[in-house]
Image: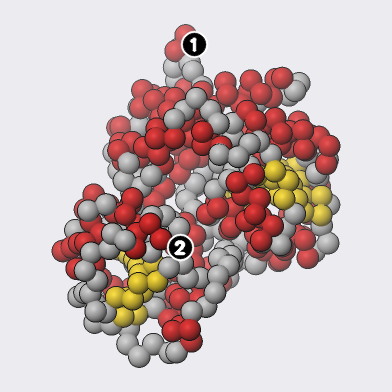
């Protein structure tokens, strides 16, 4: 079977796909990874074959300015906090608010990640390489379009609560209730226009995939009504184990990380508050920093070890807690190792993830707008001193470890691809 992976050039979105790509490769299937040229080096470093599509510097390859895209995407940005993604106030999920969300997210986010150059190159690649199956990253809808044009089966790969699809389902319900002259669907218009040029038609499978490969534990998934194939998250974070990590920790250890994101851009003036809160930890704090953050670090407490990038799957087993920006890969890695989490959610799916962890007792949700020295210190002391958090995190780990590994899901993927390819 020939399997084409499709991901826009976002490294944190691509890396979680690598274990599945290698599972298929070692099962004897041909694997090719398509993305914009910015990701080519990362794909090759993962030992996979890259097929560059579109153009480099994709964020500036469309009429939407990079600053506008950043205003939507960056944690703490005003827009991601404006919509009620967690669903606390159902009365706010009106036709007007859902349509506004679509009108902004489709051109400024989805169509930027899947701009015309990428879309057309990916379709051309799929028509020439003729994959049997296309596996596409959560927001890389161009993968579904290319699969439809080439007659391949296709599935969407996700790593966290499917917030985007829940919002889409709500939008479609409200759309159906509108009089004909008020019905507008930016997603259908955008993707349908491309499909029609190639003699194909839009339907909701282009948004959902023919099925979903979901590395989220069942207790954290949202009910979106799609055919789901669960699999275990396997971290892929290449790096070097630092010498200090070879020595066993002689006191409790906390990891503070925002993943590959610049701490200063996420936390802003709150970075100093965080450092003062971390001083309250009776133990060692491992704080990961990007190069851009090192120059602006205020006074560092004696118990904080500043490090650059370090493979989290090596650090987390030594930790009693982790504080992070509610990124899906960091959350999933902590779950594998049964580490209680303090999640600094900042909109979109991050608050949904953080709140669900808190409901399960495996962590604390600390929204970015409530982050202060006092609230972080209080959250840290709660998680470190209450064994209930460690117990709940251990139970969540057991749930994660009960899921089939990527290798174990291959027979199901082969079967689904054969079934869906015959009707593609």
| Up-down relation of residue 271 to residue 5 (above or below) | below
For mark 2, does the 10 Å Cα neighbourhood hold few (<14), some (14 to 19), or many (20 or more) residues? many
| Up-down relation of residue 167 to residue 266 (above or below) | above
Tell me what residue is drawn at x 77 percent, y 33 percent.
124
The residue closer to the viewer here, 108 or 262, is 262
Which secondary structure lies at badge 2? Answer: helix
Report the residue marked by disc 1: 180
Q: Position of residue 105 (x, y in %)?
A: 45, 32
Q: Is residue 230 visible?
A: no
Report the residue marked by disc 2: 330
Tell me what residue is drawn at x 62 percent, y 56 percent.
42
Quadrant of res 401: bottom right
Q: Nearer the viewer, mark 2 or mark 1?
A: 2
| Up-down relation of residue 255 to residue 190 (above or below) | below
Question: Which is nearer the N-term, disc 2 or disc 1?
Answer: 1
The residue closer to the viewer here, 10 or 41, is 41
Tell me what residue is drawn at x 54 percent, y 74 percent.
240
Q: Position of residue 342 (x, y in %)?
A: 32, 64
Left or right position of 318 against 410: left
Which secondary structure lies at badge 1? Answer: helix
């Amino acid at each position: 079977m020939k399997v084409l992976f499709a991901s826009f050039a976002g490294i944190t979105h691509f890396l979680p796909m690598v274990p599945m790509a290698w599972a298929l490769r070692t099962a004897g299937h041909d694997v090719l990874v398509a993305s914009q040229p910015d990701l080519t080096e990362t794909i090759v470093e993962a030992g996979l074959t890259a097929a560059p599509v579109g153009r480099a510097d994709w964020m500036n390859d469309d009429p939407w300015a990079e600053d506008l895209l950043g205003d939507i995407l960056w944690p703490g940005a005003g827009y991601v906090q404006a919509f009620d993604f967690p669903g606390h106030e159902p009365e706010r999920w009106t036709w007007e608010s859902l349509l506004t969300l679509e009108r902004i997210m489709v051109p400024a986010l989805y169509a930027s990640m899947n701009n015309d150059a990428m879309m057309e190159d990916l379709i051309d690649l799929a028509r020439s390489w003729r994959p049997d199956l296309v596996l596409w990253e959560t927001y890389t809808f161009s993968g579904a379009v290319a699969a439809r044009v080439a007659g391949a089966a296709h599935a969407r790969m996700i790593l966290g609560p499917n917030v985007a699809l829940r919002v889409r389902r709500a939008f479609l319900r409200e759309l159906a209730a509108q009089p004909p002259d008020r019905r507008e669907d930016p997603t259908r218009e955008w993707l349908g226009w491309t499909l029609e040029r190639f003699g194909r038609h839009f339907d909701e499978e282009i948004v959902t995939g023919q099925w979903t490969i979901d590395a989220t534990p069942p207790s954290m998934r949202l009910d979106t009504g799609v055919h789901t194939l669960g699999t275990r998250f396997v971290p892929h974070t290449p790096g070097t184990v630092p010498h200090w990590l070879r020595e066993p920790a002689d006191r409790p250890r906390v990891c503070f990380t925002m993943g590959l994101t610049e701490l200063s851009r996420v936390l802003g003036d709150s970075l100093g508050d965080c450092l003062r809160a971390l001083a309250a930890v009776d133990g060692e704090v491992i704080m990961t920093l990007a190069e851009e953050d090192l120059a602006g670090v205020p006074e560092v407490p004696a118990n904080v070890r500043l490090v650059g990038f370090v493979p989290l799957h090596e650090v987390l087993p030594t930790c009693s807690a982790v504080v992070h920006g509610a990124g899906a890969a960091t959350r999933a890695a902590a779950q594998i190792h049964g580490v209680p989490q303090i999640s600094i959610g900042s909109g979109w799916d991050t608050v949904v993830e953080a709140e669900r962890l808190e409901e399960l007792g495996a962590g604390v949700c600390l929204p970015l707008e409530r982050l202060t020295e006092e609230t972080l210190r209080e959250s840290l002391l709660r998680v470190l001193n209450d064994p209930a958090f460690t117990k709940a995190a251990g139970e969540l780990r057991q749930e994660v470890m009960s899921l089939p590994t990527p290798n174990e899901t291959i027979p199901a993927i082969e079967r689904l691809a054969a079934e869906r390819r015959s009707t593609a």
